[in-house]
Image (cartoon, rainbow, N blue to C red):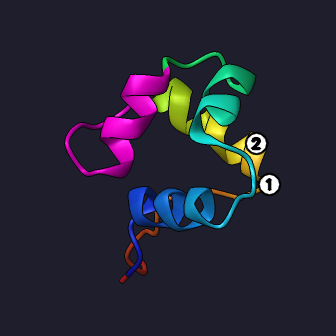
C-alpha cells in the first residue's frame, strides 16, 4: 500500500517547477515543503489537499475491505 506522503513526494519530484514556485502556488512556506520532501516533518491535511489539487492527484487513504 502506497502512502499518501510518498505519492506526494514522487509527484513533486517529477514536476518541472521549483519547490519555491509550488509552495507559493499553494500558499505554503517553502521551508515547510522542503522539510516534508526530505522526510523531516509532516504537513497539515489542508496542505495535503492543496498539493493534491495542484498536482492533479486523487488522494484517498486506502481502507481495508469490509468483512
Q: How busy is the neighbourhood of tag 1: few (under 14 within 10 Å), some, or many (20 plus)?
A: few
Q: Work out whether 14 lies above or below 24.
A: below
**Front-lying residue, 13 or 42:** 13
Q: How busy is the neighbourhood of tag 2: few (under 14 within 10 Å), some, or many (20 plus)?
A: few
Badge number at residue 53 = 2
Q: Secondary structure at mark 1?
A: loop
**Front-lying residue, 43 or 36:** 36
For the N terminus, the quadrant is bottom left
For the C terminus, the quadrant is bottom left
Residue drawn at point x = 19 percent, y = 42 percent:
40
**Front-lying residue, 5 or 23:** 23
Q: Quadrant of residue 41?
A: top left
Residue drawn at point x = 40 percent, y = 38 percent:
34
Residue drawn at point x = 47 percent, y = 59 percent:
9
Tags 1 and 2 touching, CB below 8 Å: yes
Can residue 43 be found in the magenta stretch? yes
Question: Residue 5: percent from the left, percent from the top?
Answer: 41, 56
Q: Is residue 28 visible?
A: yes
Q: Quadrant of residue 57?
A: bottom right
Badge number at residue 19 = none
Q: Is residue 60 visible?
A: no
Question: Residue 53: percent from the left, percent from the top?
Answer: 76, 42
Question: Residue 52: percent from the left, percent from the top?
Answer: 67, 46
Q: Which residues are magenta?
A: 30-44
Pointer 1 residue: 56
Amino acid at each position: 500500500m502506497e502512502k499518501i506522503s510518498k505519492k506526494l513526494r514522487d509527484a513533486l519530484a517529477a514536476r518541472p517547477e521549483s519547490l519555491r514556485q509550488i509552495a507559493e502556488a499553494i500558499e505554503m512556506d517553502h521551508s515547510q515543503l522542503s522539510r516534508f520532501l526530505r522526510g523531516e516533518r509532516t504537513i497539515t491535511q489542508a496542505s495535503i489537499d492543496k498539493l493534491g489539487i495542484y498536482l492533479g492527484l486523487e488522494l484517498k487513504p486506502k481502507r481495508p475491505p469490509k468483512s
